[in-house]
Amino acid sequence: MKLFERLKADAAPQWASYVDHEFVRQLGKGDLPLSAFKHYLVQDYLFLIQFARAYALGIYKSPTVGDMRQSLEGVKAILDVELDLHLELCGSWGMTREDIESAPENTPTMAYTRFVLDAGMSGDLLDLQAALAPCVIGYAEIGSALRNAGAATDGNPYSRWIEEYGSDAYQDLAKGFANWIDETGDVYLTEARYARLLSMFEKASRLEADFWQMGLDAAD
Ligand SMILES: Cc1ncc(C[n+]2csc(CCO)c2C)c(N)n1
């Protein structure tokens, strides 16, 4: 079994608590309170700034030029695509870039981003990839499930978000990431390392679930 598939199977409870979270269900049905989504999206913007740094760390930790290019794709996806989506949505509610960037980082945002940065700082590229994988691939799974369920097309207020993560371009990016961690695993994985990688993958999945919960808890 390839590394990503194995991690996902072994972390099945944590993975399910993330991709089947109540926030995601309400988002798909379109009845998620807007206050919850707005709070989530502002925190997600702050999250993405730190994630761009984590991908940049991936460039630094890359053993090959090919790995550097893969990490660079992540930096570009965040700086050129995802942050703009967030600014576009927040702008439609009258929020400016300054409003968002000056918002205080919530504890779940700090916990998740600093965990990923530390996984990369203290380990090698494979450790960093194990911490990043739930984020990149989980959103593709969620986007594709919601898109296939028709959530983006029936007047759902969150259709723009669903279209972005359900898009072919995003699905390809996530597949590229899965192939990349599998290939790194082919070179660097030993059975002695696996338990630590799984623990990081589980933690990242739990921190994703906590991130959704932070949004739900902010509903008024
Ligand atoms: C909490 C949280 N988790 C995952 C993503 C998705 N995501 C994070 S970085 C990136 C760019 C490509 O790797 C994507 C799509 C998010 N936005 N917020």
Image: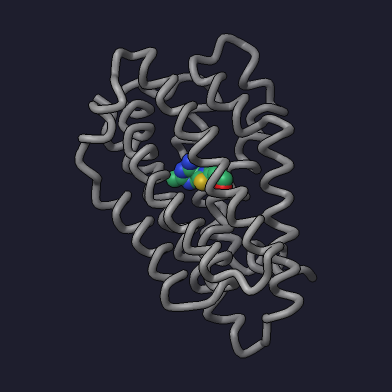
Furthest-top residue in this view? 155
Of 19 and 91, nearer the camera is 91
Left or right: where does residue 90 sit relative to residue 63? left
Q: Can residue 156 be seen by looking at this rendering?
A: yes
Residue at the (47%, 63%) spot, across then down: 57
Of 9 and 58, nearer the camera is 58
In the depicted structure, whether residue 117 falls above or below residue 208: below
Q: How many numbered marks does the figure carry?
A: 0
Left or right: where does residue 61 sit relative to residue 219? right
Of 130 and 32, nearer the camera is 130
Of 145 and 82, nearer the camera is 82
Residue at the (34%, 36%) spot, across then down: 215
Q: Where is residue 80 in the image (x, y as percent from the top left)?
A: 53, 34
Q: Where is residue 91 in the image (x, y as percent from the top left)?
A: 36, 17
In the depicted structure, whether residue 105 falls above or below residue 68: above
In the depicted structure, whether residue 88 falls above or below residue 113: above
Q: Where is residue 24 in the image (x, y as percent from the top left)?
A: 50, 35
Left or right: where does residue 88 sit relative to residue 184? left
Q: Position of residue 174 (x, y in %)?
A: 67, 47
In the depicted structure, whether residue 78 falls above or below residue 2: above
The picture quadrant where one finds residue 83 is: top left
Furthest-right residue in this view? 1
Q: Can residue 20 be seen by looking at this rendering?
A: no
Furthest-bottom residue in this view? 192
Q: Where's the C terminus, which quadrant?
A: top left
